[in-house]
Amino acid sequence: MKYSLSEAARATGKNKTTIQRAIKSGKISAQKRGDGSYEIDPADLHAVFLPIRSC
């Protein structure tokens, strides 16, 4: 299952803008949907930003 931009931000504890900048700079690969939203592969995301721990 791929993350949306909001889901990626929640999963890493980062701001959506931080995730978006990483996509635009090429640090994270993402697919853009027809509606303009992103699909982000969790493996790509977590290779750059560690997941937050859930208690």
Image (tube, grey):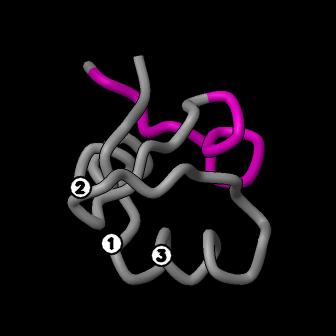
Q: Give the CA separation, mark 3 to mark 2.
A: 10 Å
Q: Nearer the viewer, residue 40 or 31?
A: 31
Going by the picture, which residue comes out furthest to the front?
Answer: 34
The relative height of residue 11 versus residue 20 in the rendered view (above or below) is: above
Q: Amino acid at mark 1?
A: Lys
**Residue count near mark 1 (Cα–Cα under 10 Å), binned few <14, some 14–19, many ≥20:** some
Q: Nearer the viewer, residue 33 or 54?
A: 33
Q: Amino acid at mark 2?
A: Ser
Q: Residue at x 33, y 72 (%)?
A: 16
Measured from the top left, where is residue 29 in percent x and y?
A: 69, 53
Residue 53: say if magenta: yes
Read off the residue under disc 3: 20
Q: Amino acid at mark 3?
A: Gln
Residue 14: say if magenta: no
Q: Residue at x 27, y 44 (%)?
A: 7
Measured from the top left, where is residue 13 in percent x and y?
A: 36, 56
In the rendered structure, are the residues bearing label 2 and label 1 in contact, judged by CB atoms less than 8 Å apart? yes
Read off the residue under disc 1: 16
Secondary structure, mark 2, is helix
Tell me if 44 is positioned left or right of 52 in this view: right
Q: Nearer the viewer, residue 36 or 41?
A: 36
Q: Earlier in the sequence, mark 2 or mark 1?
A: 2
Secondary structure, mark 3, is helix
Secondary structure, mark 1, is helix
Figure quadrant of the N terminus: top left
Tell me if 54 is positioned left or right of 53 in this view: left
Read off the residue under disc 2: 6
Q: Give the CA separation, mark 2 to mark 1.
A: 6 Å
On the image, which quarter does residue 41 sit in?
top right
In the rendered structure, are the residues bearing label 3 and label 1 in contact, judged by CB atoms less than 8 Å apart? yes
Q: Which residues are magenta?
A: 43-54
